[in-house]
Each structure stands twice: as structure tokens, then as C-alpha cells.
Amino acid sequence: MTSTTTLPGQGPPPTDPADPPPEPPRPAARWNVAMVLLPAVFVAVLGGRRSWLCDDGLIFIRPVRQILAGRGPVFNPGERAEAATSTLWQWLLVAGTRLTGQDPAPLAVRLGLLCSVIGWFLAADACRRLHVTRSGSAFLLPCGALVLLALPPVWDFATSGLETGLTTLWTAGCWWLLVRLPHTPRARTAYALALLAGLGPLVRPDLAVAALGFLIALALTHRPRPGRALALLGTAGALPLAYEIFRMGYYGVLLPLPAITKEASAADWARGWAYARDLTDAYHLWLPLLVAATAAVGAAAGRLRPAGPDRPAAAVRSRRVLYATPVLSGLVMLLYVVRVGGDFMHARMLLPGLFLLLLPILLVPASRLAVPAVGALLAWSLLTAVVFRVPYAGIGPRGIADERGFYTSALGVANPVTADAFVNGSPGFPTMIRGPHPAYRHTLVDRSTTHSFVVPLRPDLHAPIVVMWSSLGTNGVATPTTGIAIDDLGLAYPLGAHIRLTTRGRPGHEKRIDPAWVLAEYADPAAPAPPGIDPIRIAAARYTLTCGPTDRGRLKELRDSVHAPMSWRRFTANLIGALDRTAFRFPNDPIAAARQICGVDVLKPGVLPTAPAPDPALDPAPAPDPLP
């Protein structure tokens, strides 16, 4: 703390930005502690009551089991595919499972809720530190917290098995350190913020936007000298850069497979705007956001006045940075979600940006403007918590789903928090995969809305079973880890992820690989084609995988990057070709793909071998619709 002396005739010394705010009087202090704790308590109670897993959350479970079984960070043995969007969440589950011995599925629910609760506590405490003045007389009121905690999606995604709780914790942790930074001149706070902010892309790739915002704020607030600036940059970039090099060399691409299959760099503004309105219209969200903005202006007006004798320029600059960083980062993240076309889960992708946007006003000082605003927000929050809901059950007309409502209804379980709840309760899930079945050894089992077959695997494939089903998470936890679980959407299937997107549709469900490719890659070439699938297309796909006897082509190179034994030579080849490989797309039609990749018209006589005739016995029964 800076020591100053007040001379006769002078006023109180100006505020030093390094001086921490003093403790407020006891009544205000107790009240403010309650305000800090209450949001976390609400998240713990509401999130705990609505705890659940979604199928996408189960996608993390299979890689965790593969790692613990010694096969490495893969979804299927012998194929290097990164199906987990959140690298850090996956490895936290690995560590938690190893340390506790618990099943990773229910552990993901509990760990997600714990992250959410701690994140909300840190976010509210950062608001207390931001708004409590040196006079110490401010009573804090909930403002942005009322907006967020009234939304049912916030309760739902406090668990779900996804990385949303970790995202909340990461965001709140960065914000808490940033608010402390002007009052803690020691370098360790700056380095802690740099390290934590750098982990953003490992929590979710799109958090790189918020990570950049926090690092810019660190530079503007801390104003490090060139040497320290380089050290802070190295601290922030070391882990994400090291992992990106690993990803490029090991998996052969720049991004996790879900980002490739969902075409995360493509723009679909109309669908993204519809996704945003699916949230705002259901809860009339524009009204509380406008009221909260009014309260924010009142809270910030007195704190952001220009510098003067009692307001050092450094303190004013730091405070402006503190207010602006989460707001601007949140706006950019929300804009990015709209640009890419949103998601198929109601509100899920908008929650991180909305949380950032409201961070500085989760709590606000009581004032003539704040009190009526908070009263209006309280009335809206009660209506929202009790009355307002999405106007559809399950999947809406735009393809957006009330994901928790859908699964609890489909599974008949109020709180589905185990993998067994999905495997045993999912309608349409192949019964033959739920347990050992002697009749289906070394077979390819495919059940979908358009085709259904069971065929023998190619003789050189060591997997006991290959299962293809659209709900990858359920498929992954049911299929033995020695087997192969694939989905026709390409979330964990490299071949499916690189199909060219031709038409936009339901987010995340737009690419469905032609079953001919799956049969060409896994089925016994001597086996007859299943009914309803043209054997010419299977033969064309099999030809295109290696361009026939020439053993070349882009698809062969893509498959080598994930199937060839790992070595330094393979790692280097993957690393060098990662950019080009990430951008590679090919037609879903095997005949068109053969023309593009091999330069061959496979329909010409003599190009393809004679295909075996279809065998009706290979199609035992039509399959009901799988879960989305």
C-alpha cells in the first residue's frame, strides 16, 4: 500500500490504483457477502435438481475410457480422431476418473456442476470488488444475475456432461483475476491471468475470442515492459501452442473433428439469427436486457468520470478496461455464434457470450436508478422461472431442441446421469449392441432412418464389431472400447467429417455420409451388398479410397494420416499437411468423388470389379428413428 502524508490545507490524498478498497461497514459487508453467495447457491440447487447428461456429453466418455485403457486420446482403436471439442474438459475427466475411480459419466455431471458453482461465486465476488468504493457504503443488488439465473437453459447446462460448467469457471476466473490486477502490483497475478487466459482455446476453440480480450486487457491494465510482456505472452501461449502442434502432428488437422464436420468457419447469418431469436423470443429477453443496460449506465456513470485531482488517470483507465473487456468480448462471441448459424441445442452456444456480456453488472450498487430496475428484473425473472418456456416440446420447427426435455421424455428418466440410462432407454438403439451377442461377432451393424443392415467385416480388421448409429455418445458408451463406434454425421469419423457440405439444414446434422463409404471401408468385399444400397456405389467408394491399384489419392493420404502407425516421420508429415488436410473436402457421391480424386470415370467398363448381388437376408428388420 502506498504511504502518503496530508499537509495542512490539503484534501485527502488521491486514490492510488494499487490501493485495495477498504472493507465496507459491517451491515453492508454482510449484505454484500450474501449477494455474492446467493447466485452460486441458486446454481447449485437449480442445477442439481435438473442434473442430466446429453448424448453430446457422452461423446467425451469413450475417449476418457480409451485413454485410461492405454490406447491414447482416440475415439476408436487404430484411428486417431479427436471427437472431444473441449480438450481441457476431456483431460479433467481423465484425471477425475483416475483419482476417484468413479464412472466418468456421472462424474462429468458432478464435476460440471462444481465448476458452475465455483464460477458463479468468483464472478459475483469480482463484481463486489469492482463496485465497492473506498467509502465502503455501497449495498449491492443482483442485476445481471437475475437475468441469467431466471433462464431454464442456465439451470440445464450447469450439468449436461458438456464443458459449459468449465467454460463458466474459466470465464469467471479470468474476470476475477483481471479485477484484482489493478490492486495487486505483484507480477504473479498478471502471470496467473496470462496462464488462465491462454487456456481458453483448450476449454473451447471459440473461447479464443474471449482469451484475446482478457490478454489485451492485461496489457492495458498492467502495462508491462517489453521483457515482461514477452514473458507474459509466452506464459499465455505455451500450452495452447504446444497442444496445437501435438494436434496437427497426431491427428493431422488443425481443429477437432466436430469443428470440421460442422464447418465452423462458414457463415449462415439467417439461421444464426433464428437461433438467437429462439432464445430471446421464448423469454422476452430483450426487455430485461434493456432494463439491465439502464442499470449498467447508472452503475458505471459515476465510476468512469474523466481523471481529475482525486481520480488518477491510471485508475480511470483501468476501470474503463474492466468494464469494457467482458462486454466487448461477449458481444463478439454472440456475433460469432449468429454468424456460424447457431446450434441445435436451445440457447447452449449463446450462454457463454451472454454471461460475459453481463459480468460487470451481475451485481450493481444500490441507487435511485438501480432499485427500480432491479425490481422490474425481479418481476420478469419470476415470470420467466415459472411461466415462460420454449413454444415446442423436444425438437422445434427450426431444428432447435429443448435437449434436456427431449431426453428426459425419450428415456423416461427425470435425471439421466448415467450411460446405462441412455443405452437401455434410447428408443431405436440396436438391442444387439447392449451386451455380448454371439451372432454378431466381427460384424458391421448399421441402424438409421434410411437403411438397416448387418454384414461381416473385412477379414484383416481386428475390431470385434463396428457399430454405426447417429447418436454418437450413446453408441460410444455401448460399443466395446475394442470395437469401432462411428456416426454418419462425422463427429468422430474422419471420412464423414471431410464430406463437402452441399445444403444447409439442422445445425450439426447436415452431413450424412453415404453408407457406401462405410461398407467400402469396413465390410468384407466378398459380402453381397445390403438391399437398397447400390453395389456399384460401394465398389466406386472402395476404388476411390486408394484410387484402385495405384494406391494413391487424397482419401488415401487422409486415411494414412489417422491410421498409419505413429512415428516421427508420420508426425512430421501430418504436421506439414495439417492446413491443407483441414480444408480438404470431397463429394459424398462415390462416383463423383472418384472423378475428383482419382480422375477416373468408374462407370466405364473394366474399371470396377464385378460386385456380388444383394442378399435380402442381410437386412433383418427396418429400424425406428434414432435419437437426434
Image (cartoon, rainbow, N blue to C red):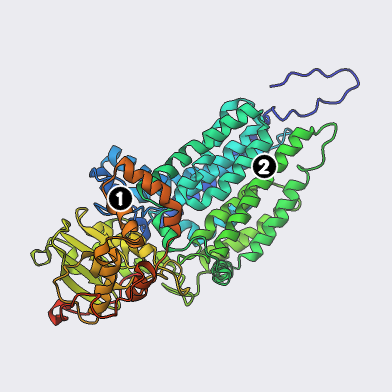
**Kind of residue at disc 2:** Leu
Residue 469 drawn above or below residue 46? below
Q: Earlier in the sequence, mark 1 or mark 2?
A: 1
Name the residue rendered at 32%, 46% in the picture. 570
Residue flagged by tag 1: what amino acid is it? Val
Task: Using the numbered discs, state the Cα–Cα distance from disc 1 to disc 2 in whole angstroms.
Answer: 40 Å
Residue 74 numbered tag = 1
Image mark for residue 322: 2
Decide if residue 593 is on the left or right side of residue 167. Answer: left
Count the numbered circles shown.
2
Residue lying at the far left of the rendered structure? 438
Q: Nearer the viewer, residue 601 or 65?
A: 601
Q: Residue furthest right?
A: 9
Which one is in front in this view, the residue at disc 1 or the one at disc 2? 1
**Position of residue 612 in the picture relative to residue 590 (left or right):** left
Give the structural element (helix, strand or loop) at label 2: helix
93 vs 238, left or right, is: left
Residue 113, given in percent of the width and then of the height, sits at: 42, 49
The location of residue 53, given as percent across then percent down, is 35, 58
Please state the horizontal and vertical placement of residue 56, each as a whole percent of the image.
37, 59
Numbered circle sitting on residue 531: none
Image quarter in which the C terminus is found: bottom left
Q: Quadrant of the N terminus?
A: top right
Q: Quadrant of residue 411?
A: bottom left
* Residue 350 or residue 201, whichever sits in front: 201
Q: Position of residue 175 (x, y in %)?
A: 58, 42
